[in-house]
Image (cartoon, grey):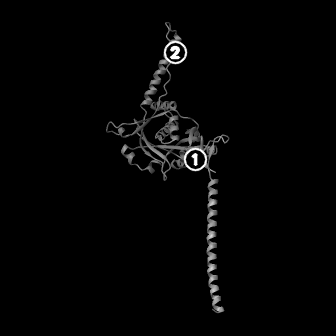
Amino acid sequence: MNTFEILLNYLDISKFLVILTIILIISVTYLLLSSDATIISEALHTECKIVPVTKNPDTPKEINEGNKNTIEEKTVEIKGYHQNEIKEKEKKFVLSDKKQNVDHLSQKLIDGKNNVMTKNDELSIMFIESLSSLNSWKNNELGNKLFKEINWNLEKKQNEKDDEESLVYQYVFPQSKIKESLSPITSPNLSSSQSSVNSNSDTEDGEEEKEKSLLSAYKLGICRTFECTEENKLKSNIVKEVNGCFYKVYSQGAPELIKEKCRKETVPQNYNEMVEMYKKGGYDIIGLCGKKMKMNYIQCQRVERSKCESNMIFLGFVVYKMNYDGYKYAYS
């Protein structure tokens, strides 16, 4: 074998060794990188632990690793009901911080029967009707709280006869605030003053019975509901008083959405100011609006939602806050 052939053989072996070395380097590099990635991943996973956020950081609760989907307990704090009212002298709409209850409503209904109801009385009745009918579905904690606070009842109707009223599947109506009756003081000789007291008591009992009778006949039938959706974030319904002529549409939702649905002349000048003030205080706000519509039951089932939720009257705000009890899970 000459020198040239030896040199060629040496070069072939060198090529093989070079290729083998490159393969080894690549393999080792790949193994090292994979190992580092695993370490980094484990480190990140270790740092991103689920930790409890407690109301009192000094007394943290133990974490149950097997139950990471702990339900948060919430309570609703109602700041107040702000009802829209009209100042006749200034011809302006204002927000009045008045909490409506069954006593106010019953008196306004009595005034209405006597044809002395003012525009503000009508707005007051619509305001509490919207609160009761829209939150009687009882599908969330806030709705339950609102319905309970305004002291109304829910009644589901059984279809017994084929008329318009029997087609309504549920009603809402105010509870009568019954006074505690005191046991009469019996005495063999009644003075004139005592007779007068008994006479006044009889009169009050008569007024109370009249009020109870009026409230018992006052029922709102919930004829149709419009749920909150991705496209339409309002909650609305169509209601009708049992002995009334008009159907009414009520809506509730975020203040900015409610404002878009209302006629401009019904929106208070301090609307945005009120919203910003309570939001800065950490409160949430629900806007309420409504209107009357002349139609029958069949028409109310066929009418388009967009037609119902337009040219409405602004009724007021509900200001509230959701408080969290216990603890909830968060990522650190």
Residue 113 % position (x, y): 45, 31
Q: Which residue is mark 1?
A: 65
**Is 4 displayed left or right of 93 in the figure?**
right
* Furthest-left residue in this view: 162
Q: Is residue 12 above or below residue 226?
A: below
Check disc 1 and report its element: helix, strand or loop. loop
**Is 257 displayed left or right of 164 in the figure?**
right
Q: Is residue 123 visible?
A: no
Q: Amino acid at mark 2?
A: Val
Q: Which of the two residues, 182 or 213, is positioned nearer the viewer here?
A: 182
Q: Which of the two residues, 189 or 177, is positioned nearer the viewer here?
A: 177
The N terminus lies in quadrant = bottom right
Q: Amino acid at mark 1?
A: Glu
* Furthest-top residue in this view: 188
Q: Is residue 236 visible?
A: yes
Q: Is residue 35 above or below residue 164?
A: below
* Furthest-bottom residue in this view: 2
